[in-house]
Amino acid sequence: MACGRQFKSTWAACHELARLRFGIEVVPFDGTVRPLEPQMAGDAALWREIAIREGLAEPDLIRLASPWHTDADLGQPAEVVAEEQGRRLGFAGYQPTADALFALFKRLGVDRLIP
């Protein structure tokens, strides 16, 4: 849950982002956990080729992505973020999660970190 909304695996904005930004369809979650770290274990050379071909700013995959950290954050069976604690700590600003994701990926493209 984030801001009171569930967003893992079935969240429409993730599907839209994948389709519009990368031209791929999201595979529905079938109950099988698929950690990112082993999936990306041999991808450094491929990313370097993509980065060179696309003129991207960062050819070193490990500087751009941290699969073990993603697994630690998103690999939990349930996630709850309480807004109340953040507000008590002074984080009063609000941006809808979908808007934040689209802005992030737009910025990553402008900065030539992703194709």
Image (cartoon, helix red, strand yellow):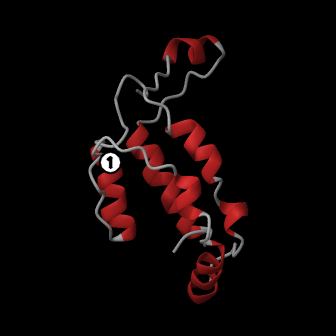
Q: Quadrant of the N terminus?
A: top left
Give me the residue at 33% from left, 71% from top: 23
Q: Is residue 75 left or right of residue 72?
A: left
Write down the residue under mark 1. 13
Q: Is residue 35 left or right of residue 48?
A: left
Give me the residue at 57% from left, 82% from top: 50
Towards the viewer: 47 or 39: 39
Give me the residue at 42% from left, 44% from top: 33
Q: Secondary structure at mark 1?
A: helix
- Quarter holding residue 77: top left
Give me the residue at 57% from left, 57% from top: 38
On screen, 43 above or below 104?
below
Towards the viewer: 67 or 113: 67
Q: Which residue reaches farthest bottom? A: 53
On screen, 110 above or below 72?
below
On screen, 33 above or below 94?
below
Q: Residues within 10 Å of mark 1 (few under 14, many from 20)?
A: some
